[in-house]
Amino acid sequence: MQPGSASGAGASGGNRQLKRWGPIAGIVAVAAIGVGVFAATGGDDDSSSGSTIATDAPTTTAAGPETTVGDSAVPTTGGGGGEITYPLTYSQAVEQGIADQIDWGDRCDTTTGRVAVPDYFAPECYAPFSGDNGGSTADGVTADEITVVYYEGLEGDPIISYITDAIAADDTNAQQFETMRGLVQYYETYYEMYGRKVNLVTYEGTGLANDDVAARADAAAIAEQYHPFAVLGGPALTNAFADELASREILCVGCTPGQPAEFYQDRDPYVWGLDGSAIQKQTLVLEFLQKQLIGQPASHGGDAVQGQERRFGLVYIDSSDASSELAQRFADQMEAMGAPLAEIVAYELDPATIQAQASQVIGKMKAAGVTTIILSTDPVAPRDFTREATAQEYFPEWFVAASTLVDVTAFARTYDQQQWQHAFGVTQLAVRGDPNATGYYSLYQWFNGSPPPADDTIGVIGPNPALFFAMVQGVGPNLTAANFRDALFAWPGSTRAVSQPYLSYGDKGYWGGVP
């Protein structure tokens, strides 16, 4: 997410930061803190954004696939009297020579071919639909409605509160649902829904963010009570929710922390995320380390490490079964590059024990002579790690390795600044932007005429519906999970901008076989 200027990390300062998380908010979410940890979770191109990033998310970015997808196309008579095969984008209509035969309506700016909203990332227009949309094309879909469940975590979950309290983000579940409702109305107004509206239902989880049993029970309850086509969101620290939904053939977006490639492949086409995969992030970090740091003297730490040849240590959050495997993969790659890790330490996201864990983590790093600590963490733990390092009079280099929100000012200001003043590393987030001019906050305010009720966290609420609605209009009338997948893979990717990462799905030839 992108930070903004604010004074201090108190109630007002921290909140203003969150409002500035702009159009690439799909990379990570406060309620999905496990997604961005490159040594803690996995993933593949099917779940890649990212934000996330990777990624100005589709909706404030590009719209949908530029080609007709699978068997979703439906020929019918358009407003101009000619036959149209849906879905049809403005550029496709121009290529076919029929753009001037279609009544695009007020929602389309025909001078640009894009939706008439005040957004650089406005999606391409889609031809207004008329005719038979196929009715019940999938469970949770009728001729008139698409049932979508918005998952919200248990109110007051101490694990999530540990994250949000650090920056005084205090949006309630009720405020977040009202904000989601306002975003849905925006998409329904400007995106082509092929005759359908969204029946939006909210569901509050019954367990903590890492409770596998409660997560699976919640997924079952959602399936049996609401029979939705899709679920947006899920518990932050367990894949059980997504696994249960997939077993019941329910599509979900942003419903699990990132997982190994096989997890998504085995549950194809039901589980989707908005962040780069763990392996992709490792690849990027390793390349940076090899080209910029390995074999070079430390230059961003205290006097005791300054000028010493770098000696690396890894601190990572243990948030899934894949955590240790991915950490070992990283260690193996470092050794192959001639820089074996001097120390590897895992920690658990447990607010009750984090201070004690910090003492052990820092003690081990200091004893191993580590000059450069590679962080793969949640956004709050560095507060305890840096304070403990100062208490132990240990001033190493701090290298941010795609850690979730650690590179956001709202959180970074809570860290010990004696330690953090020279922190550096790799990010996949966007540059700062004015929330009143770009991103979900500005779009919500422009469309609804008032700020979002969840003004602290709209930036992390927005990505899931952004992806969902972009693909719904890209699929066409024949809405199914398989066609949703095909639309994602056919989609060329998000609108490119100097200030934003780029989001695409499927094999686009960027990673050379890296999943």
Image (tube, rainbow, N blue to C red):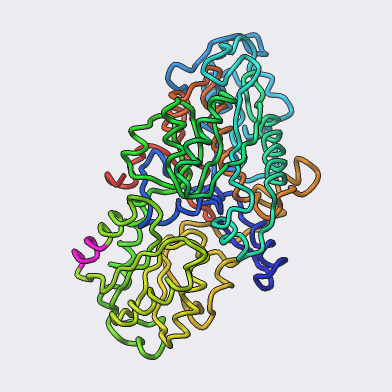
Determine the residue positioned at 30% across, 59% down: 327
Relative to 293, is 267 above or below? Answer: above
Relative to 285, is 359 above or below? Answer: below
Query: Which quadrant of the structure image shows residue 91?
Result: top right
What number of labels is visible?
0
The residue nearer to you, when weighing 488 against 163, is 163
The residue nearer to you, when weighing 498 against 190, is 190
Query: Which quadrant of the structure image shows residue 189?
Result: top right
**How far from the left and from the top, in percent, is residue 186?**
70, 35
Determine the residue positioned at 42% across, 74% down: 398
Residue 347 horizontal side relative to residue 497, left or right: left
Residue 178 in view of the camera: yes
In the rendered structure, which segment of residues is drawn in magenta? Answer: 331-337
Of helix, strand and loop, which mostly describes the magenta segment? helix
**How far from the left and from the top, in percent, is residue 422?**
47, 78
| Residue, far right | 449
Determine the residue positioned at 60% across, 43% down: 152
Residue 245 horizontal side relative to residue 102, left or right: left
Relative to 403, is 367 above or below? Answer: below
**How far from the left and from the top, in percent, is residue 122?**
62, 40
**How far from the left and from the top, in percent, is residue 86?**
54, 18
| Residue, far bottom | 303
Q: Quadrant of the C terminus?
A: top left
Residue 53 in view of the camera: no
Relative to 433, is 417 above or below? Answer: below
Q: Quadrant of the N terminus?
A: bottom right
The residue nearer to you, when weighing 382 against 501, is 382
Task: Check if residue 5 falls in the magenta segment.
Answer: no
Task: Check if residue 336 falls in the magenta segment.
Answer: yes
